[in-house]
Amino acid sequence: MAEKIERVKTLIVGSGPAGYTAAIYASRADLKPLLYTGMEPGGQLTTTTEVDNFPGYPEGIDGPTMMVQLQQQAERFGTEVRIGMVTSAELSDEIGGIHKLTIDDSKVIEAETVIISTGASAKYLNIPSEQRLRGGGVSACAVCDGFFYKGQDVAIVGAGDTAAEEASYLANICNKVTMLVRKDYMRASKAMQHRVTSLDNIEIRYNTEVDEVLGDQVVEGLRMVNNQTGEKEDIAITGLFIAIGHKPNTDIFKGQLDMDETGYIITKGKSTKTNKPGVFASGDAQDKEYRQAVTAAGTGCMAALDAERYLATVETEKAVV
Ligand SMILES: Cc1cc2nc3c(=O)[nH]c(=O)nc-3n(C[C@H](O)[C@H](O)[C@H](O)COP(=O)(O)OP(=O)(O)OC[C@H]3O[C@@H](n4cnc5c(N)ncnc54)[C@H](O)[C@@H]3O)c2cc1C
């Protein structure tokens, strides 16, 4: 028998810093939000041991603990948190229209407002030694983890603007940065290339890829391979940063929401409004620039305020008619 369709004022999709912050604000505004966690309850921060830059934690905190605390804070004000994936969506074009989202291909939730906080996933090389040492010196976020390698030798993989930006960030903190570029040129803009090449402690290795990350529990070195000659070379490093791009988790909204060429949801002006009335986007799903927990939380707050104001406007219009 088909399950009963539920209707909610606010449905929040995703349980990272953006989703839980939206939930804290929405529940305190009495929107009685329902939040679906997705496959990664707590989001990306559950894959890291130390978060040192989220305000309010003077001693730092481990990612999973921080996310449990955010969940508890959201639940304290009445957010209902459920395990489940949104597998498809039918978003209304009408002001005051009802959005229908399907959970795990079975249950349908009807929502007056939807806050999308589905984040983005960092791309990895997917070689066994890299996967084994994730969190042990392999990171996909230089701004988050670079500090832990202050004064040390590190390497970065990538050749685009983000890689160039992160390489120069690391060069300010670390002793030496070896940059591995797969082709014989960089994809980054000329300005970014200039920034990288003008820094003395960045060594760019063209036509070079990771053969193996060396180390048992933590990164101790890197075996590089020249993809033209097959020649291998080991260097001693303590950190390896992967900067080959991110993929926003927005496929289920493709064709309905305006997105850029990579799939980041486009929001209007300084708001979290999407092209569909009553649908808001927050966190890494709409932000390819900053991608930090605190910025995700900030836009989660904005999305809840935008949803609350939207619902108030719809109510007022109904009362006038
Ligand atoms: C290794 C690592 C270390 C980091 N360290 C730091 C740090 O120290 N400081 C910092 O500020 N930032 C750090 N970051 C970045 C930070 O984690 C992200 O910027 C932040 O988590 C983004 O929050 P978000 O809520 O937008 O998305 P995410 O945290 O990515 O959460 C997305 C959520 O959406 C859910 N979801 C996805 N698709 C669906 C669906 N279809 N249905 C339902 N749910 C769905 C997922 O299950 C997940 O819960 C780090 C990132 C990584 C990878």
Image: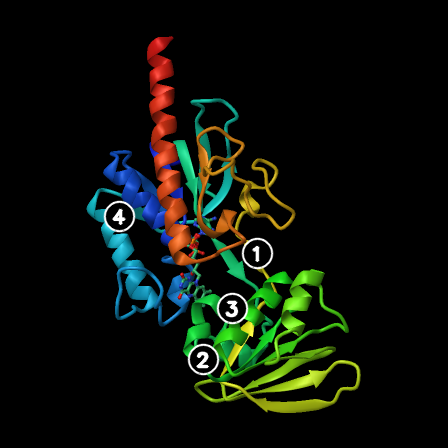
How crowded pointer 1 is (Cα within 10 Å; few <14, some 14-19, many 20+) is rated as: some
Disc 1 residue type (three-letter): Lys
Disc 3 residue type (three-letter): Ala
Residue where numbered disc 2 is placed: 149
Q: Nearer the viewer, mark 1 or mark 2?
A: 2
Disc 4 residue type (three-letter): Ala
Query: Is the CB–ligand 1 distance for label 1 below 8 Å?
Result: no
Q: Which mark is residue 43?
A: none
Measure how far apart labels 3 and 4 are at the Cα level.
28 Å
Give the x, y percent position of residue 248. Answer: 54, 52
Position of the C terminus by quadrant: top left
213, above or below 106, in the image? below
Q: Nearer the viewer, mark 3 or mark 2?
A: 2
The residue sitting at 43% across, 47% down in the picture is 117
> N-terminal of the two: label 1 or label 4?
4
Q: Is residue 4 visible?
A: no
Q: Quadrant of residue 308?
A: top left
Is the C-beta separation of discs 1 and 2 under 8 Å?
A: no
250, above or below 154, in the image? above
Residue where numbered disc 3 is placed: 140
- Left or right: 305 as drawn, with respect to 194: left
Residue where numbered disc 4 is placed: 74
